[in-house]
Amino acid sequence: MRYSSAVRPGLNVACLALLLAPASAAAADTAASSAGPSAPDNLLFVAEKLAEWNVVLGGGVLIAPKYEGSDEFDVQPIPFVTATLGDHVTVDPRGISAELYRIGNFGFSGQVGYDTGREQSDSKHLRGLGDIDMGGVVGATVTYYMGEAEIYGSLSRIIGGSDGLQAKLGFKLAHDVGQFRFSAGVSTTWADEEYMQTYFGVTPVQAVLSGLPRYEIGAGFKRVDLELAATYAVSEHWLLRGEVNLGYLLGDVADSPVVQEAFQPSVMLLLGYRF
């Protein structure tokens, strides 16, 4: 883990009326001349705007821990859809991000997405802890751009589910070499008490049902991550991408009885078609 509306509006009310009105009366001709561009012009405008979007459709496979803190892994097929409009708007499986303002090397963006929650059926180790519902996510990010590198800080609030707050500070670097694009990043994530207790705490009731010891946890740094990725342009349209994430849970999170393993690696391989 750059948002706004998916397509900037190109048709006003008068233009919509033009498209829907009969084209046989003289009054329609008068309305057309007063409203501005004709219907074909408007359709061309919309087509041009849609053409500015860079859309990639594809799928792949993800190998990742069954839940955050698990020592077991799942192999999952994953569909992949992403659409970008320049450097300003991105729509992908995580949600929507839009750059709202840029001044000098600083960019300010907003995000809307979701938190998947957690089900106790994901692992035998989670039985008795209950499910954590899915929640919506609203966030904001400040980025400082330095050529191919960037430093960013983000803050996101989960609405529903844990009702928690997370903050992330990170550094990213990307570089193109021929048909390859390599990127690397490092980040650390902080979470508030609500989030920590929901995902890594064990209440007295949960302790009785699960057999795990009672555990209370407060706000603090949750994890650090190293992300490595490479994208290969097989042809003008086909892309092959591989990602490796090396995560490590920190402090009180790593000590939680919910956590079986602090080291949290994942691997993803994707094949996509760019329109």
Image (cartoon, helix red, strand yellow):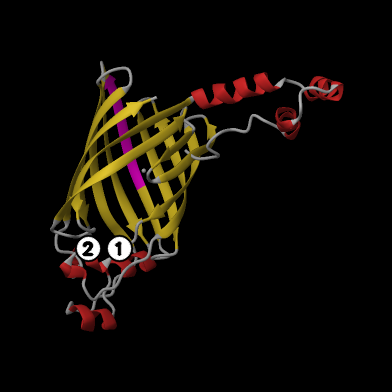
- Residue 32 lies, in percent from the top left, at 79, 22
Q: Which mark is residue 101?
A: none
Q: Secondary structure at mark 1?
A: loop
The front one of 120 and 154 is 120
* Residue for badge 1: 118
Label 2 packing within 10 angstroms: few (<14), some (14-19), many (20+): some
Q: Is 175 included in the stretch rendered in magenta?
A: yes
Q: Are marks 2 and 1 in contact (CB under 8 Å)?
A: yes
Left or right placement of residue 108 versus residue 66 in this view: right
* Residue for badge 2: 122
Left or right placement of residue 229 versus residue 155 in this view: left
The amino acid pointed to by label 2 is Asp
Marks 2 and 1 sit apart, C-alpha to C-alpha, by 7 Å
Label 1 packing within 10 angstroms: few (<14), some (14-19), many (20+): some
The answer to whether residue 253 is above or below residue 264 is: below
The residue that appears at 47% across and 38% down in the rendered structure is 2
The residue that appears at 29% across and 73% down in the rendered structure is 130
The residue that appears at 28% across and 75% down in the rendered structure is 216
The answer to whether residue 264 is above or below residue 118 is: above
- Residue 69 lies, in percent from the top left, at 20, 60
The front one of 272 and 151 is 272
